[in-house]
Image: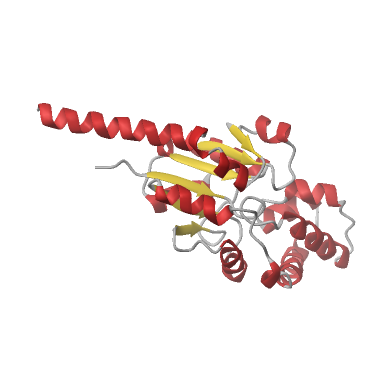
Amino acid sequence: MTTKRAAIFDVDGTLVDSNHLHVVTWWEAFRQAGHHVPMREIHRAVGLGGGDLIEHLLGDDRDLDGDDQLAAAHHALYATYFERLRALDEAGDLLRALAGRGWKIVLATSASGAELSALRGAIDADDVILGAASADDVDDGKPAPDPVRQARELAGVPSERAVFVGDTVWDMKAAVRDGVVPVAVLSGGIPRAHLEAAGARALYRDPADLLGHLDTSVFADMSQASADADAYSRIARNDS
């Protein structure tokens, strides 16, 4: 019996080149509501769910009645890009390569609904994606562990047999809190030092870089460990 393993992926900035679109559309949503929020601060907050991002950038003393309007404005602005979203190079190939090696592929993202559908369409790898834990499925988004845990439970694996690949500090913190292996890509524009400080076990330039180094990555290490465990289990059963 082969031991199941889960490869959990964030989407924005990890598989799809969309982080800077979020920066621009959040900046415009804030501007329309009368808030001046520097783009660099928005960039650092990308990866949080909409409500958490607003709270992070505007603080607890903001007018809470404006949150829904801000989130709706961002969604409307970002939706104008849905048909033009593009996956990062070899993102779909990476997912298929891992699936071919026996990994269960699951997404963990703050996106949901039509946005998540557009992102999955850009990746074009639904044939190997088992499911997705979206903002609709959990009470708390990243950096809470809930999205990663939900994705892992979809795959039916414990934390020690899962890897989470993301591009933000919030991704790495969520992975650490759930006990899965945190792997980072730099394609979202977050500095290497920030990702390492948040717990990244390994870093790659983008999905193509990770795919090119798959045989020397944590995925290969865990695959071998699982194969060894399966072989030991078979030997133990035969000896009994």
Name the one closer to the observer, 32 or 2. 2
- Going by the image, does 63 lie left or right of 88? right
Q: Is residue 128 visible?
A: yes
Give the quarter of the figure containing the C terminus.
top left
Name the one closer to the observer, 163 or 231. 231
Residue at coordinates 57% horizontally, 41% vertically from top-left? 212
Query: What x and y, as percent, mark residue 53?
Result: 72, 53
Q: How is the image coloured?
A: secondary structure
- Going by the image, does 225 lie left or right of 46? left
Image height of 130 relative to 183, above or below = below
Name the one closer to the observer, 208 or 46. 208
Image height of 200 relative to 36, above or below = above
Residue at coordinates 83% horizontally, 59% vertically from top-left? 27
Query: What x and y, as percent, mark residue 94?
Result: 53, 50
Report the residue that reaches farthest toward the front: 212
Q: How many marks?
A: 0
Query: What x and y, as percent, mark residue 158?
Result: 39, 40
Residue at coordinates 57% horizontally, 38% vertically from top-left? 183
Q: Is residue 179 visible?
A: no
Name the one closer to the observer, 59 or 136. 136
Give the quarter of the figure containing the N terminus.
top left
Residue at coordinates 51% horizontally, 61% vertically from top-left? 125
Query: What x and y, as percent, mark residue 68?
Result: 72, 67
